[in-house]
Image: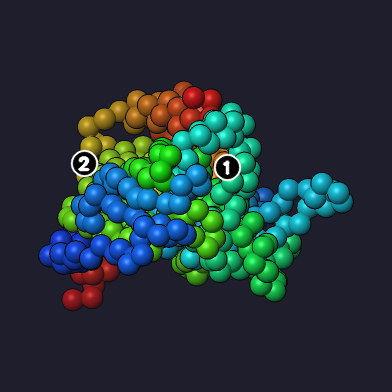
Amino acid sequence: MKIEFWGQEFKANLAIGIPGAFLIAIMSSMFGFGGGPFMVPLMTVFMRLPMYVVVGSSLLAIFFNTLMGTARHYGFGNFDLIFFLIMFPAAILGGFIGPKIAKRISPIAVKRVAVAGLLILALSLLGVF
Amino acid sequence: MKQFLTFITILIVIVSFSTVGYAQKAAETKPAEQKSAEALSEGKIEIKVDKNQLSGGGKITITGKAPAGRDVYIEVWSEKTVRAARLDSDPDPRTGKRPYIFYMTDEMPGFYKLILPEKYKSVLEEEKAKGKKWSVSEIIKKSGADTVYGYPAKIKIDRYQTTLWASIIGSRGTKLEPMDEKENKRRSMQLLKARFRSIGAIFSSNLKIEENGSFKASVELPSNVAPGKYFVVAKVDKDIKSEPVVIENVVSFPNVYLPNAGRTVNIFWPFLLTLAITTFGVVMGAGGGFILNPVLVMLGLPHTVVAGSVMPTVLFSQATGIYNYSKIKFISWKLGITLGLAMAVGGFIGPKLTELITLEQYKFLFGWVLIILAALMFWQTTPKYLEKNKKEQAILKEFKKRAEEAAKKKSEGGK
């Protein structure tokens, strides 16, 4: 598929993009997160699109996933309103605070800390400790 | 500014809910202790508790008298109910076929305890030694509690014949006929395990019985249990039992009860946890749902409700992001919608799978997802990636600048 972005034309490989998006959506809606960290590599590496095309479009694609997933979880009775109302303002507030902190910290250092944190979390989920 | 107003509105709603929680404290109820008229005659059980009211959980001492020489058991359960679900996919020992039947109830008591006589302590220890393969029905059988296991055996359990295809299209499957009493009892034991997860959460063996039939036991209601009524019944068999004693548990601000999760939490810990993880997620540039989710599950909340409540948080958080990007024409609608439709189909299927898998499977799969994520993130800190990213960031800045200029020009042209 050809897409136009600010006067430039790009070729997007849908043969790999559509199945990839589908599988990422199953996994992320199953676990209750958006799927952004997987969609961005899918679109930049496998679909060979530059980051500036991907950043906004992936958010739109993920919106479809979270909207559908939310409706389905709600339909199955797995939504807790009070719990959501506790978390949601905190998430919005985090969205305000985050960018201010991001300006003062090295993004590479943060990502490395995140890698370590994710591995610790992963290993404890797998029952290693 | 719009975001800020939204935040204020949400905060007001939160305060309203907190007020409701606070109001519960004002309702001081003291139900009268019940005592049967012929308490001491043969075939009757007398029972007493040391307090009828608790605040945020606590310990209750239960004393009473039963016919001498008999084993006594005590059941304690909550009035408030929660959901319990389980997919039966173990191969049948005779046929080797996997049944794929999904059992579900919304009538599981939020708290349930069966207190056994002290002499059955070894039964609990034997089952604990089996690790994850422990069995509620084995404990009940070996401790002679089969005729006194009562309250959960009567809950209404739905069952569905599910298939791989049904899971793919996101349905629970074909609803089956209700079970008979015996089968319902057996399945309720399996759902007890699925819901409460550990032997200690369901059973204890601190019931002391004297030769003359006097007995004493204690039960601890954890601080995360639901507000409302709790019932205590002592039994010798299915016919000889005490009248229920009622205990009221009060929950007050800043603790709130989460009805679907079936837990009482201090309002601040999920708030601060979400705030910390979301902030870190923004700085990381990757969102925080995939960190928040497993942390909440490991803190004891049901994985189904965590997934179902975190996902709308993600949904509403990203809606503002989409709006902002679209204003500066930074979204390829063609690309976004094409992939979005594929993701919508996947999003239809995923939540069904959440219900079907056990907590252990959930943790296992999520563990591997996080390892993959860690690898992806590490790759994003490699020099080769950073160099390429630097170039694209420069182009991104250029486009953003152009977009803002174009938007400005357009708004000026409109005047």
Image quarter hosting the C terminus of chain B: bottom left
Residue A107: x, y in percent? Answer: 34, 31
Task: Report the chain holding disc 2.
Answer: A
Instruction: Note whether residue B361 is visible.
Output: no
Residue B190: x, y in percent? Answer: 60, 52
Q: Amino acid at mark 1?
A: Ser
Residue B136: x, y in percent? Answer: 58, 46
Horizontal side of B294 relative to B174 (left or right) equals left
- Residue A51 or A73: which is nearer the viewer? A73
Q: Amino acid at mark 2?
A: Lys
Residue neighbourhood size for the residue with mark 2, other residues' Cα within 10 Å, grouped as few (<14), some (14–19), many (≥20): few
Query: The residue tagged with tag 2: helix, strand or loop?
Result: helix
* Residue located farthest toward the bottom when viewing the structure as drawn: B415
Query: The residue tagged with tag 1: helix, strand or loop?
Result: loop
Image quadrant assignment for residue B286: top left
Instruction: Note whether residue B82 is visible.
Output: yes
Eyeballing the image, is B408 above or below A11?
below
Res. A100 mark:
2
Residue B165: x, y in percent? Answer: 73, 63
Horizontal side of A81 relative to A72 (left or right) equals left
Res. B143 mark:
1
Residue neighbourhood size for the residue with mark 1, other residues' Cα within 10 Å, grouped as few (<14), some (14–19), many (≥20): some
Task: Report the chain holding disc 1.
Answer: B
Determine the CA span between mark 1 and mark 2. 61 Å
Image quarter hosting the N terminus of chain B: bottom left
